[in-house]
Image (tube, rainbow, N blue to C red):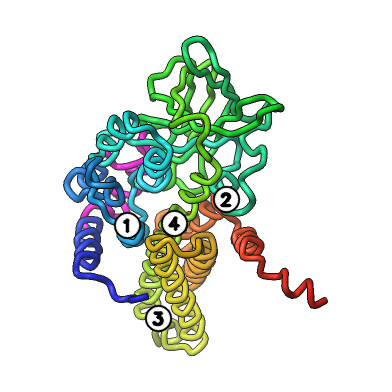
Amino acid sequence: MDARLTAEQEEIRRTLREVLAKRCGPDDLRAAAHSPEGHDRALWGTLSRQLGLAGLALPERYGGIGCSVTELALACEESGRFLAPAPLLATAALAAPLILALGGEDQRAALLPRLASGELTAALAVPGAGLATALALVDDNHGDWAGGGRAGGVQARRTDGGWRLYGQATQVLDGHSAGLLVVAAHTGGFARSRTLLFLVRADAAGMVRARQTALDATRPQARIELRHVEAELLGDEGADVPAALAAAGDAAATVLAAEAVGAADRALERTVEHVRTREQFGRAIGSFQAVKHRLADVYVGVRAARSAAYYAAWAAGTGAERVGGLALAQALEALRTAASEGIQLHGGVGFTWEHDAQLSFKRAAGDELLFGPVHRLRAHAAETARLFDAAEVRV
C-alpha cells in the first residue's frame, strides 16, 4: 500500500478546501441548516456541476468522473471539516452506488447522469431506525429489518400495474428534499420472504414526507409515509439485495469515517487556536502541561482515525477485506473526543449555541445514532472477522 496521495488527489483536497472555506462560514452553515431543504442549494450546485463531486465515484459512461472510493473519501474529509450543508452523503455515498450495482441498464442510463450532474438528488429510505443494520454495519442484514411481514416496516405488493408500497421509514437522510427515493421494502409474505429495493419519485401520489427535528441540524432527516404508493423495482427480483447493501455500507462507512476525521481535525484546530490566546493566571492556558497532554491525546486519536479511514478507502478500492465499519468506529470516537475536549477547553463559551464547538459534538452524537454506536460497530467487525473463534477453541 502506498499511502502517498497523487497529484490529482491533492488537487481535489486543495480545491475543495478553498471553496468550502469561502462558502461555509458559521452564518452560512446555520442559514442552510434552518432552510426548508436543510442544505445550501447554491453550494450543492457548485459542488456537483462545477466540481463534479456528485459523480466523483461514478463511471464516465454515466456522466461521472470515474474515480474510486478513495477520492470520494478525500472529498468528504474536506466537507466534514466544514460540516458542509449538502446532500452529498445521501446522494453520492448511499443511493447512487445502489442504483449502479442493482439497476437495469435503462435505469442506470436514466438516473445516474442526472445524479452525477447534481440535477437530481436521492436518498435511501430504510424502515424504522434500521439504517446501520440494513448496511450490515452493526448486524447481519439478512434478517427481517425491512418489516418481516409485520406492521412498522415497509411492505411491497405486486399489482396489475406494477408495485405498490405501504409503510413508514424514519431517519431518512435528506429524504424530505430528495427528488428520488430508494426504498427498502419487504415482499413475498412468509413463504418467500425477501427484501427488495424500489424507486419512488418525489411527486408520487400517496407519499407524505416531513422533516424531523434531529440532534444534528446539519444532517437533516425526514419521516416518509407510504400509502399505496406506485414504485418501480430496482433491477430484478433475483438481485442479491443484502450483498449490495453490505457493499454499499462498507463504502459509505469509509466515506463517513473520512468525513468524521475532517470534522475532528477542525475541532482540534479550533481548540488549539483558543488555548493559545485564552489567558488564565496571567498566561495562556495552552502553556499548562495538563492542557498540552489532553490535546496531545486528541491529536494522536485523530491521526490514528485518519490512518484507519485511508486504509479502509484503499481496501475498498482494491477489493480487499471490508474494514469500513471499523474505520468508522475509530473516526467517530476521535470526533466525539475532539469535540468534547474542545467544549471543555473553551470554557463557558463552548457551551453556547452561538459557538461552533457544539456543532461538532452534535455531528459525532448524531452519526453514532444513525450508523453506530461505536461499540456495536467494533463488535460486528470482530464477529465478521471471527476474531474470537480461536480463543474459544483454546478455552
Mark 3 → mark 4, Cα distance in angstroms: 36 Å
Provide the residue designation for mark 2. Answer: 136
Residue 182 pos. (x, y %): 45, 33
Which comes before the other along the chain, label 2 or label 1?
Answer: 1
Provide the residue designation for mark 3. Answer: 279
Residue 68 is labelled as: 1
Which comes before the other along the chain, label 4 or label 1?
Answer: 1
Q: Nearer the viewer, mark 3 or mark 2?
A: 2
Q: State if disc 1 and disc 4 touch (CB < 8 Å).
A: no
Q: Is residue 128 magenta?
A: no
Provide the residue designation for mark 4. Answer: 256
Residue type (three-letter) at the residue carrying disc 3: Glu
Secondary structure under badge 1? Answer: loop
Mark 3 → mark 2, Cα distance in angstroms: 48 Å
Q: Residue furthest top?
A: 160
In the image, 226 versus 296, the foreground residue is 226
Q: What stretch of residues is rendered in magenta?
A: 22-41
Which corner quadrant holds the N terminus?
bottom left
How many marks on residues? 4
